[in-house]
Amino acid sequence: MSAAGWRATLRDTVVGAVAIVSVSAVSAAELDYHLRPRQVAEGVYVFEGANDDFSTRNGCNIINTGFVVTGAGVVVINTGPSRLYGEQQRAAIRRITAEPVVRVLNLNLHPDYLFGNQAYADVAIGALPGTIRDMRAEAPAFLDNLYRICGDWMKGTEFLPASVPLDAGDLRIGDRILRLQRLEGHTNDDLIVIDERTGVLFAGGLVFHTRVPTTPHARIGPWLASLEKLRELPFRVLVPSHGHVAPDASGIDQTRDYLGWLDATLDAAAREGRDLNEVLAVPMPERFRGFAAREPEYVRNVTHLYGPYERRALEGR
Amino acid sequence: MYRLSEILRATILVGAAVSACAVAAAEGKDPFDSGQWSGMEEEFLSGQKVAFDDRVKVTGPRFAEDAMNVPVSLDATALGEVRRVMVLVDRNPIRKVLEFFPLRTRPTLAFRFKLQQSSPVRVAALGADGVWHVGSTWVDASGGGCTAPGATRASGTWHQTLGQSQARFFGQGDATRLRLRVMHPMDTGLVAGIPAFYLEELALRDEAGTEYLRLQTFEPVSENPVFSFDLPEKPVGKLVLSGRDNNGNRVAAGVAP
C-alpha cells in the first residue's frame, strides 16, 4: 500500500475510533466554537482562538481570524481549522453585518488559516502565489494530522485551495484600502494586511504573543528581518495569528526575543556537539515560561530546526 | 505491510509462546507490559540471561514529531563494563535497529531512527556479568516512519552523496564527544518499489588497527545517520572509519583528531 493510502486508512481508522470514543463526551450539538467577534477598531473584528496547542478540548481553534466591513462587502482574513469553523465564522459575521462576504484571504499555508475555506466556496479566496503552490503540496498531510488530533471537529472538512493569486499592493474595496505586503520567514510567503483607515495590522504567523512560535516552515534569519520591517509599520492595533491582540509592538518584540534565543541556543548546542535529546533538555529562560504551548512547541522547534546547525558544526563551518 | 519473513517469524513465535513455560523469561517486570516482548526476547536474546534494569538509561521524546527521525540516547555506564548493546523497537515492522560494540568508547550512544507507530524502545546492554540488562522508554507517534521514502530518496539526490561522511570531535567536560555522519538513504524496503538499501557495518579503528567501536546497523536507522559517541579521551592519532552497506558499497574515511 502506498504511504498516502496507508495514511488515509489510518486516518479513517483513527477518525472512526475517535468518533466512537467521543460519543458520550462531545455530541454533535456541542461542536460549537462559540465564535464571538470582538470589535478592535471601526469596522474591524477579530475572533480570538485559545492561546494553546491543538486539542479536542479547544476544537483545534487556536487561531485569531478576523474580518473587515468595507461598505461594499466583507473581507475575511483566515478561515480557521475546519469546515465547521468556517461555517460558524460566516454565520457570526452575518449577525454583525448584512453585507456579503466578497473576499477571503489566507495569510499563509498552515492548516488553521484555510481549512474553513469550504464555507466560502462561492467567494474569491486569495493568497500569495507561493502560498497557493505550497498549500496544494502540503494540505493533504495537514488534513490527516488535524483529523488525528482534533477528531469530530474536523467532520466533513476537505481541502479547498485558495484560487486567486495575490500581488502585494493595495486592495481597494468599498471605503477601505487594505495594504497587502509579502514578508517571509515564518513560512516561505507570509502575507500581512494593514487596514489603512484604522491602522489594524493582521500580522499572520510572523507574530506570536505570549506563545511559543510554530516553526514547521521557519527560517529564522528571514523571519527576524521581517519582524524588523513590521516594527517600522504605522499600526495602531496588532492582531497576531496566535496569542493576544495588543495596541503595541509587544508581540513583535517577544517573537524576536524568542527566535533570537532559539537561534543562539541551537548554534551553541551544535558547536558543543550536542545530540537532539540533549538540546530538548535545555531549560527555557524564565521570561518565556509563561508562554502558551511551551513544551510541545519547543520540542517541535528543535526537531524542525536543529539539523542545519548540526551539519554546519560537523562540517566545521 | 509485514514481509513474509515477519509473518513466518510471527507464526514461529506463536509456537514459541506456547512452549514459553520451558523458557526462562526476563527477570523483573516489563515497565510497559508489552505483548511483543516475550517474542522479541526469544528472537534476539534466546538462551541468554535477561533482566529489566533501570540503570540502562534510554532517553527519547514523549512524542515523535518526525517519525523518520526519532532521537534516542542510551547510557549504560552505570553497569560498568559493557561489551555489546542492542536497540530494539517492539512495534516496528523491523524491530532490530542496531547493535553497538563500545570497545574503547563509553557505553553511550545517540542517534535517530524511524518509528512506525507508538512503541516501547528497548536498549539491551550485555554486562560483564553475562546478563543482558534492558532499559526502556516509550515514544508516541502518529506513525508511518518506516513506510515513507526519505527526503533524498524522494528527491532522487541520494546518489550524489552516497557513502560520504563527516566526523568531528567536541570537548565535553571529562569526555570527548565524537559525532559521525554518514550519507545513506537507509531505505527500509517497506516503501513500494524501493528495495531495502541500508548500511550494515561501521567501525572505527586507530592507525595501528585497534578497534574503538563497531556498529551493526539495520533498516530502521534514519536516513543520513548521525551518531554521537563518548570517548574517555581524545585519540592521539587519526581514526579510520570503514563500513559497508547491504549492496556492498564501501564507506572509508579518516577522522582527524
Image (cartoon, coloured by chain):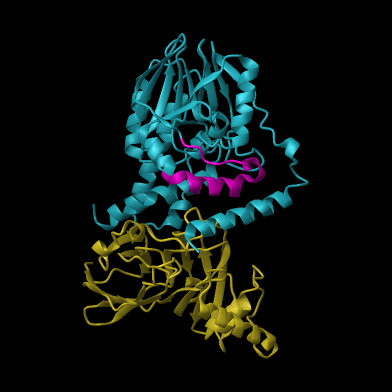
Query: In this orientation, which residue lies closer to the viewer: A34 or A302?
Result: A34
Tell me if residue A145 is in the magenta stretch: yes
Residue A239 coordinates in the image, percent (x, y): 49, 24
Identify the hue of chain B.
Answer: yellow
Residue B5 coordinates in the image, percent (x, y): 51, 80
Question: In the rendered structure, which segment of residues is drawn in magenta?
Answer: A137-161
Report the residue at 39% width, 45% height from top.
Answer: A265
Residue A201 coordinates in the image, percent (x, y): 45, 20
Q: Quadrant of residue B164?
A: bottom left
Q: Is residue B215 above or below residue A179?
A: below
Report whether A315 appears left or right of A310. left
Query: In this orientation, which residue lies closer to the viewer: A233 or A169?
Result: A169
Q: Quadrant of residue B7?
A: bottom right
In this orientation, does residue A224 appear? yes
Q: Is residue A282 above or below residue B219?
A: above
Residue B248 coordinates in the image, percent (x, y): 29, 79
Report whether B212 appears left or right of A120. left
Q: Is residue B89 above or below residue A57?
A: below
Q: Is residue A58 above or below residue A70?
A: below
User: Furthest residue to the front?
Assistant: A122
Report the residue at 63% width, 19% height from top.
Answer: A94
Tell me if residue B141 is in the magenta stretch: no
Query: In this orientation, which residue lies closer to the viewer: A189 or A237?
Result: A189
Q: Which chain is cyan?
A: A
In this orientation, does residue A283 appear? no
